[in-house]
Amino acid sequence: MTESDNSLLFSTQDLPQDRRFRRFVALLSFVLCLFASSVLVSSGVVAKEIGPNEDLCRVINDPLTENELVLAPGEYQGPCTIRRGGDAERPLIIRAKEETNRPHINYQGESANVLEIRADHVIMKGLAFGPSKVDAIRIRSNKNVQVIDCEFFQIGGIAVVANQSSLDGLIVSGNVVRDSRATAMYFGCHDGNACRLGSIIIEKNVIDGVSAAFNEIGYGIQVKLNSSAIIRENAVRNTKGPGIMIYGSDQISLKESLIERNFVSGSRTSSAIVIGGGPAIVRNNIALYSVQSGIGLENYGRRGLLRQIIVGFNSVYGNRTGGITAPQTSVSDTFLIGNVGWNDSEAAVFPSDQSGIWQSDNLNCDQRCFANPGDLDFLPVPGSPLDRHRVRFSAAWLPKVDFFGKPRNSPPRAGAVESIGRPWLLP
């Protein structure tokens, strides 16, 4: 409406009161009917709703479109490069209208990515992707991008990737990736110089099944050199390569990565969790049934970055070549504290005593220590060596809660679990 059109709603003083009211109601009803199909108002924020018959990419990039775009259920056609963002106070939000009936972004070609984000301050929430032959969401932004509660199925590229531009402020949370045909989540640049990512939070994601071509690794989550992240409360199962891997930093001043309260199981060619360098804290994780170790410290590329690493209060079980492993050389300023483990092979659960690794209060347990490991219940059996074992080491990094977020005893037991028992199931 123009300004003069809008004045029709309120220039009614010359009419009797009841007629003014009826005219107001009639005009207001007309306006609401006109816009109800395309505009939602929630908590003072104006949102535009669209359906699958509209051009998704055109609407996203239209500068006149509201900063919250609500997608009704249905199938939308990609690809799309998102060039319009928001700002810190008012980001561009692209979200599903219905949490239980996700809009599906479809693209079967190979010349582009399904969605490519080239703008800052963008939030994607509740969308569905796949099958596809290319990356689902590729991020080329510099500030504040969130990918929340999305679903990815049979993605031939990477489900969520940010490896071409430095980015500060990335949240990847609550997503489900199933039957991925390549690495599921990839952050940072391989050489550590072309791009660096900071303030990354990767949490509460489910990654269930990763395959890859014979010459590709097939990670669940990887964070490259000179990028740091908080990786917590993820469930990663049945990957080709490592379930989680970080590469550390060649700069000692980089903020440490934190890997905690993750459930990682069944790497077919590697360890469940791989630490390629520090600084890093790895605590309260359950890592099991991998062809190599539960947690592996690896001198990746002989870079010599295995320093300032803390591995504490993890439960490692049934891994083929060891519970927690490390090379015999090129490790320094590394602590293994309060871990518990058992192997189904003759391999040692923990590294032998060596220079550069300080070990305390780790427990080489047997199956009888855990309530029901076959059912993923790693609660200590009352009276078992694990139940009686207390960690009396003191440091600021010691977790105050266990795998389930429950307060720990004082002094705490070794391992990831002190309360409840069975981890959440992968849905």
Image (cartoon, helix red, strand yellow):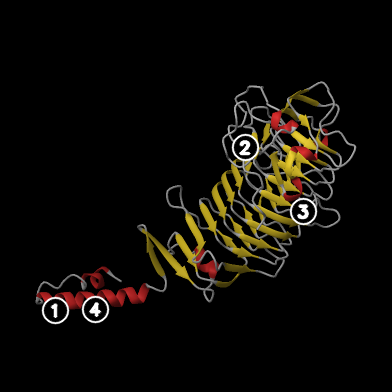
- Asked if 168 appears above or below 10 in the picture, the reply is above
Q: Quadrant of residue 214?
A: bottom right
Horizontal side of 382 relative to 123 (left or right) equals right
Quadrant in which the C terminus is drawn: bottom right
Q: Which comes sooner in the sequence, label 2 or label 1?
A: 1
Label 3 vs label 1, nearer the camera? 3
Secondary element under disc 2, as helix, strand or loop, is loop
- Asked if 333 appears above or below 117 in the picture, the reply is above
For the residues labelled 2 and 3, the Cα–Cα distance comes to: 24 Å
Q: Amino acid at mark 2?
A: Asp
Q: Amino acid at mark 4?
A: Ala
Horizontal side of 123 relative to 312 (left or right) equals left
Label 3 vs label 4, nearer the camera? 3
Q: Amino acid at mark 1?
A: Arg
For the residues labelled 2 and 4, the Cα–Cα distance comes to: 61 Å
- The residue under label 1 is 19
- The residue under label 3 is 238
Q: Amino acid at mark 3?
A: Asn
Q: Residue 296, image x and y in percent?
A: 79, 37
Q: Which comes sooner in the sequence, label 3 or label 4?
A: 4
Q: Is residue 8 visible?
A: yes
Q: Which comes sooner in the sequence, label 2 or label 4?
A: 4
Q: What residue appears at the point 32 percent right and 73 percent down from the top-left corner?
A: 32
Q: In the rendered structure, are the residues bearing label 3 and label 1 in contact, judged by CB atoms less than 8 Å apart?
A: no
Horizontal side of 175 relative to 92 (left or right) equals right
Secondary element under disc 1, as helix, strand or loop, is helix
- The residue under label 4 is 26
- The residue under label 2 is 402
- Asked if 90 appears above or below 33 in the picture, the reply is above
Q: In the rendered structure, are the residues bearing label 2 and label 3 in contact, judged by CB atoms less than 8 Å apart?
A: no
For the residues labelled 3 and 4, the Cα–Cα distance comes to: 61 Å
For the residues labelled 2 and 1, the Cα–Cα distance comes to: 68 Å
